[in-house]
Image (cartoon, helix red, strand yellow):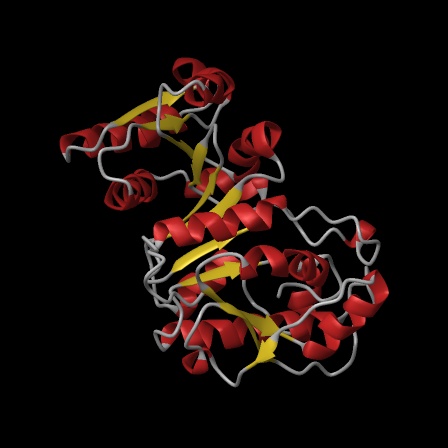
Amino acid sequence: MGDPAGIGPEILLKSIPFLVGLPAAFVVYGSKEVLDYYSRLLRIPYSIEEVESAAEVRRKGVYLVNVPVDALPAPGEISEISGKAQFSFLRKAVEEAKRGLLGAVITLPINKKAIALAGFKFPGHTEYLADAFKVKDYAMMLSNEKLKVVLLTTHVSLRKVPDFIKKENILKKLVLINRIMPGSKVAVAALNPHGGEGGLFGREEIEEIEPAVKEAQELGIKAYGPFPADTLFPKAAEGEFDVVLAMYHDQGLIPIKLLGFGRSVNVTLGLPVIRTSVDHGTAYDIAGRGIADTGSFKEAVKLALSLANFHPSSTSRT
């Protein structure tokens, strides 16, 4: 259910009619107490069937696995109480996914400061899920109608990014992209302005990125670049490439959000279970006001069902 002090509960309450209308079963891991509180606060009535586990689900609909909270977090406030709730919701969902009870995991946002107060030792969902599923080769991808962008580095200080620009790291991401989306044309972004200008503005392109691209090509991967990022993204948005491998978080996410904020989806590549998420944060500034946009969450749901090759005749638990 995401962060109970943010907009997660509101997005969920608003989206229940949408979920009910889909030919699949959805299991919410969250607190009934929190949902009841937001239902009263926002005047959004809801109906949801409680189950002990996703294993009890036999038909389409929306179900709740109630994960109790120590206390009701105040909307819009960073607190350890909120962090503990977020961590417990996520942990329960992952436990059931590891048991093979879920076809996909769709996450609403966590507040990284709040969840860190609760002992969460990871930069974000992506890294936690990779650790939980014992996966070493994974990647964060943001996708919308215009662009698909995979990030080489995610939640890393900009000062430290060059330390991760290594041939082996880039090659691993290119191999992973090709495994998940075989035959895709992958454009690799440069790290430095003007692609380093032949070494004048930095040598990462010459010493690390270009060799990784060439080795990927030798493996039969349709990798190209490195290209200066400022001219690459317009070309990718026009369809010249299928996927862009960006070197760092904001390099990749700024164009994605510029072209489709609120309609983009975060996908974790490389996990044994499908995982999608929204393209936004917990939005504490509007929590409890009833104005949260459900667009990205609905896109995340639709993409998860599509990736699962869902068929209406089957029962898929998400």
Q: Residue at x 54, y 32 (%)?
A: 256
Quarter of the figure with the C terminus: bottom left
Relative to residue 266, is residue 254 drawn left or right?
right
Q: Is residue 142 visible in the rendered structure shown here?
A: yes
Pinpoint residue 218: horizontal percent, then vertical percent: 14, 31
Q: Is residue 82 above or below residue 69?
A: above
Quarter of the figure with the N terminus: bottom right
Relative to residue 84, is residue 64 drawn left or right?
left
Front-most of 257 and 124?
257
Query: Residue 14, located in which quarter of the rendered image?
Result: bottom right
Q: Residue at x 42, y 25 (%)?
A: 190
Q: Residue furthest bottom?
A: 52
Q: Is residue 295 above or below residue 204?
A: below
Front-most of 274 and 17?
17
Relative to residue 209, is residue 79 drawn left or right?
right
Q: Is residue 278 visible in the rendered structure shown here?
A: no
Query: Residue 17, located in which quarter of the rendered image?
Result: bottom right
Q: Is residue 135 above or below residue 291?
A: below
Pinpoint residue 79: horizontal percent, then vertical percent: 77, 69
Q: How many marks?
A: 0
Front-most of 135 and 70?
70
Pinpoint residue 200: horizontal percent, then vertical percent: 45, 15
Pinpoint residue 210: horizontal percent, then vertical percent: 30, 26
Query: Residue 211, located in which quarter of the rendered image?
Result: top left
Q: Residue at x 22, y 33 (%)?
A: 183
